[in-house]
Image (cartoon, grey):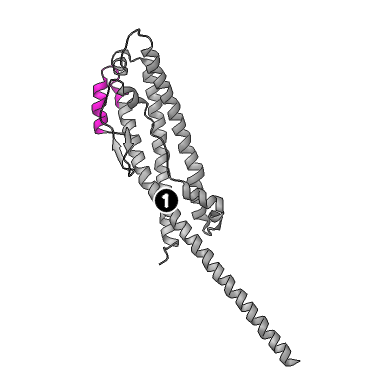
C-alpha cells in the first residue's frame, strides 16, 4: 500500500510539474508576444513623430503665409504670395517611395489652392488598432504607459481631427468666395486676377478665421508630439527587442 501511495504521489508530482512547465512556457510566449507587440507599436509611434514634426512645420508655413496676406491685404498680389510659398512651402505631393515633393510651379488659378490648402491629417494607426482589437493593449501592466497610449490615439487624435475638419469647412468657404466672384463675369477670368482685383472684407474675415484655426492646430500638435515622445521613452525603458 505504501508503495502504491508513493507511486501515485510521484505520478501526481510529475503531472503537476508538467503542467507547471507548460504554463510557464505559455506565460513566456505570451510575454514575448506582448513585448514584440509593444515594440512594434513604438516603431509606429516613432514614425508618427517624424510625420508630426513635418506636419507642424507645414502648418506653421500656412499660418505664416496667411498672416502675411492679412497684414498686407490691400497691396499683396498673387505673384507675391507665390514667392512667399517658395520660401515657406506646404503644398506637396509624394513620390512612389513616400518622399515629400513640395510643389513650386504655379498656374493662373494657383492662388485658390494656396489659400484653401488644409493639409490632411493622416498618421499611422494600423498597429494600434490591431492591439486594441486583439486585447493586447489591456495586457500592458504599466498603467501610465497604457493611459498615455490610449490618450494619444483617442482624445488627442479626436481633437486634432476635429480642428482639421473645422479648417476644411473654412477652406470650403474660401473656395465659395472665389467661385462667387468668378461667376460674376460673363467671360473667362482667373482666380489670380480675382485675388488681385476683388479682395474684400469677406475674404479677409475668412483668412482671419483660418489663422486662428491654424494656431489651434499647431498648439494641439505640439502637445501631441510631446505625448508621442514620452510614450516612446517609456517603451524603450521597459521593453527591449529580443535577440
Report whether 219 appears left or right of 86. Answer: right
| Image quadrant in which you'd find residue 223 | top left
Whether residue 173 is situated above or below residue 138 in the rendered picture = above
**Quick one: which residue is furthest to the top in this view?**
186
Apparent side of residue 24 relative to residue 176 in the rendered image (left or right):
right
- Residue at the spot x=47%, y=57% of the render? 38
Residue for badge 1 = 44
Total marks placed: 1
Q: Is residue 230 above or below residue 82?
A: below
Residue 223: say if magenta. Answer: no
Q: Main secondary structure of the magenta part?
A: helix
Residue 133 is situated, as x and y percent measured from the top left of the image, at 55, 50
Residue 69 on the magenta segment = yes
> Residue at the bottom extreme?
2
Q: Is residue 89 left or right of residue 8?
A: left
Q: Quadrant of residue 88?
A: top left
Dot 1 crowding, Cα within 10 Å, few <14, some 14–19, many 20+: some
Which residue does the image show at 46% across and 29% down from the upper left? 166
**Quadrant of the image for the C terminus?**
bottom left
Of 206 and 115, which appears nearest the observer?
Answer: 115
Judged from this view, the residue extending furthest toward the front is 96
Residue 112 screen position, x and y as percent: 34, 22
Q: Secondary structure at mark 1?
A: helix
Pick the front one: 28 or 196: 28
Residue 27 in percent (x, y) is at: 55, 67
Q: Which residues are magenta?
A: 68-87
Q: Quadrant of the N terminus?
A: bottom right
Is residue 68 shown above or below 132?
above
Residue in front for this viewpoint, 165 or 27? 27
Q: Does residue 127 lie above or below 160 as drawn?
A: below
Amino acid at each position: 500500500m505504501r508503495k502504491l501511495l508513493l507511486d501515485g504521489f510521484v505520478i501526481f508530482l510529475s503531472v503537476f510539474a508538467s503542467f507547471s512547465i507548460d504554463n510557464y512556457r505559455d506565460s513566456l510566449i505570451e510575454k514575448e508576444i506582448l513585448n514584440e507587440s509593444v515594440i512594434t507599436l513604438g516603431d509606429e509611434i516613432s514614425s508618427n513623430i517624424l510625420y508630426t514634426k513635418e506636419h507642424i512645420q507645414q502648418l506653421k508655413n500656412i499660418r505664416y503665409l496667411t498672416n502675411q496676406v492679412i497684414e498686407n491685404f490691400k497691396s499683396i498680389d498673387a505673384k507675391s504670395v507665390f514667392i512667399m510659398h517658395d520660401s515657406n512651402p506646404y503644398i506637396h505631393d509624394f513620390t512612389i517611395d513616400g518622399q515629400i515633393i513640395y510643389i513650386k510651379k504655379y498656374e493662373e488659378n494657383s492662388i485658390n489652392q494656396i489659400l484653401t490648402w488644409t493639409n490632411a491629417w493622416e498618421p499611422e494607426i494600423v498597429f494600434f488598432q490591431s492591439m486594441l482589437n486583439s486585447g493586447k493593449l489591456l495586457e500592458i501592466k504599466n498603467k501610465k504607459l497604457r493611459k498615455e497610449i490610449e490618450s494619444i490615439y483617442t482624445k488627442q487624435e479626436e481633437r486634432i481631427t476635429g480642428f482639421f475638419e473645422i479648417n476644411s469647412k473654412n477652406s470650403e468657404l474660401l473656395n465659395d468666395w472665389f467661385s462667387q466672384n468668378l461667376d460674376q463675369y460673363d467671360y473667362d477670368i482667373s482666380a489670380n486676377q480675382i485675388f488681385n482685383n476683388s479682395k474684400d472684407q469677406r475674404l479677409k474675415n475668412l483668412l482671419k478665421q483660418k489663422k486662428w484655426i491654424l494656431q489651434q492646430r499647431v498648439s494641439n500638435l505640439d502637445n501631441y508630439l510631446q505625448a508621442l515622445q514620452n510614450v516612446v521613452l517609456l517603451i524603450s525603458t521597459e521593453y527591449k527587442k529580443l535577440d
